[in-house]
């Protein structure tokens, strides 16, 4: 069996006039994340973790922010495409672990729904999708509420 791990990281700026999407869930907040797509920082980090584990470069290679086709794109669709790219190389997802770094809004109430949304996109059960939230104790750009960051780790395998 071929087992690989991957690590992804992403950052987006918080701005007025944008919706806030995290792990495929629209969260009510006064600010949203700025990006070419829906700017779902958590799913972008997850895409990079999966692509890296399979040695398939990064999210920007497949979905460049210079391509109008991805303007406002739903990151769940990008994640589904990444899973297809892995499948083309014979890989399946074992489990993933995502950490979202933000001072506000509170993420914990949304985690059960996030797990329910992400799991089928990966072809796993919600028990194989870890999602956590943390603050940076008011330090740095996330602490000042200027943006959000996310990290993701994954395990993929070939039989």
Image (tube, helix red, strand yellow):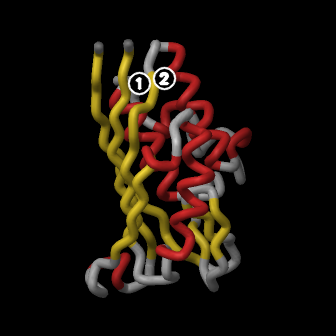
Res 83 → quadrant: top right
Res 64 → quadrant: top right
Quadrant (top left/top right/bottom left/bottom right) for the N terminus: top left
Residue 135 x %, y %: 33, 78
- Judging by the rendered image, the residue that carries numbered circle 1 is 56
- Residue at position x 37%, y 70% in the image: 101
Q: Work out whether residue 31 or residue 125 is closer to the camera in this orientation and state it.
A: 125
Q: Earlier in the sequence, mark 2 or mark 1?
A: 1
Query: Mark number for residue 33?
Result: none
* Label 1 element class: loop
Q: Work out whether residue 104 or residue 110 is closer to the camera in this orientation and state it.
A: 110
Q: Is residue 36 above or below residue 63?
A: below
Counting the numbered discs, the total is 2
- Residue at position x 57%, y 59% in the image: 114
Apparent side of residue 95 relative to residue 70 in the rendered image (left or right): left
Labelled pair 2, 1 in contact (Cβ < 8 Å):
yes
* Label 2 element class: helix
- Judging by the rendered image, the residue that carries numbered circle 2 is 86
Apparent side of residue 118 relative to residue 132 in the rendered image (left or right): right
Residue 103 x %, y %: 41, 82
- Residue at position x 61%, y 42% in the image: 66
Q: Is residue 55 above or below residue 8?
A: above
């Amino acid at each position: 069996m071929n087992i690989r791990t991957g690590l992804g990281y992403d950052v987006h700026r918080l701005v007025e006039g944008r919706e806030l999407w995290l792990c495929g869930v629209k969260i009510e907040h006064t600010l949203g994340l700025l990006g070419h797509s829906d700017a779902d920082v958590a799913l972008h980090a997850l895409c990079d973790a999966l692509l890296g584990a399979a040695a398939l470069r990064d999210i920007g290679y497949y979905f460049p922010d210079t391509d109008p086709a991805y303007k406002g794109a739903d990151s769940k669709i990008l994640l589904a495409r990444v899973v297809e790219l892995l499948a083309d190389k014979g890989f399946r997802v074992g489990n993933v672990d995502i950490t979202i770094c933000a001072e506000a809004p509170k993420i914990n109430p949304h985690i059960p729904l996030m797990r329910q949304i992400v799991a089928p996109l990966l072809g796993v059960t919600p028990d194989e999708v870890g999602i956590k939230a943390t603050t940076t104790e008011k330090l740095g750009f996330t602490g000042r509420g200027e943006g959000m960051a996310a990290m993701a780790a994954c395990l993929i395998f070939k039989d």
